[in-house]
Image (spheres, rainbow, N blue to C red):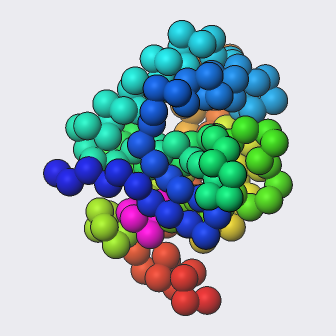
Amino acid sequence: MTLIATLESPRLILRQWRDEDLDEFAALCADPQVMRYFPAPLTRLEAAALMGRLRGHFNEYGFGLWALERKDSGAFVGMTGLLNVSFDAPFTPAVEIGWRLARRHWGVGLASEAAWACLRCAFSQLQLPEVVAFTTASNLPSQKVMQAIGMQLDPDGAFAHPRLPADDPLRPHVLYRIDLQQWLHTVRA
């Protein structure tokens, strides 16, 4: 296993987590607008624990959710990356792509740009056969990013997230997929 410490895109550095990221990461995870498609905002302690789990994923697999930093200012943007899906579902085992950005960085294409760098890593460096993405059915902004990076909605892939209660309105999830051939087609288009 080789650690993929950093990736780059035109405007971003995708890098390993630093202790000094915690303040901004905790603020990001505490923002109710950012977390509206998650069960609840996170406390600082929960954000620190999440950051620890993200570091652990890198240590175990060599990849994960990278911290995003703007090249022009060094500003912390959020996170984007690849994770092994950690629950049982009809589509697992699988590697998912995900992102979470601070509100001040929304609407300028940074999520898609970082996700493209992650897909390039997934298919060229990690040589994965497929990458999935999923979100609650109501999360249209994330679904737009999935579509922008060439992912296709799996019409038979809708599922109830097993970690959410049966009556939770966020439980119904949609599933998107992209494989190497789809990615190559998207890159060439």
Secondary structure mostly taken by the magenta-highlighted segment of the chain: helix
Inspect this view and state whether residue 166 appears.
no
Which picture quadrant has residue 43? top right
* Residue 151 percent coordinates (x, y): 58, 65
- Taking depth in this image into account, of 140 and 112 the one nearest to the observer is 112
Q: Is residue 132 left or right of residue 104?
A: left
| Residue at (34, 72) in percent of width and height | 124
Q: How many marks?
A: 0
- Judged from this view, the residue extending furthest toward the left is 1
Question: Is 183 rendered above or below residue 100?
Answer: below
Residue at 62% across, 58% down: 71
Q: 145 and 155: which one is in front? A: 145
| Residue in front for this viewpoint, 158 or 96 | 96
> Going 76% across and 24% down the picture, which residue do you hit?
31
**Span shown in magenta:** 118-122
Residue at figure coordinates x 77%, y 47% from the top left: 105
Q: In the image, 52: left or right of 146?
A: left
- Most extreme residue toward the bottom is 188
Please say whether residue 161 is visible from this viewpoint.
Answer: yes
Residue 102, quarter of picture: top right
Q: Quadrant of the C terminus?
A: bottom right
Q: Is residue 110 left or right of residue 119?
A: right
Left or right of 134 in this view: 51? left
Q: Nearer the viewer, residue 64 or 18?
A: 18
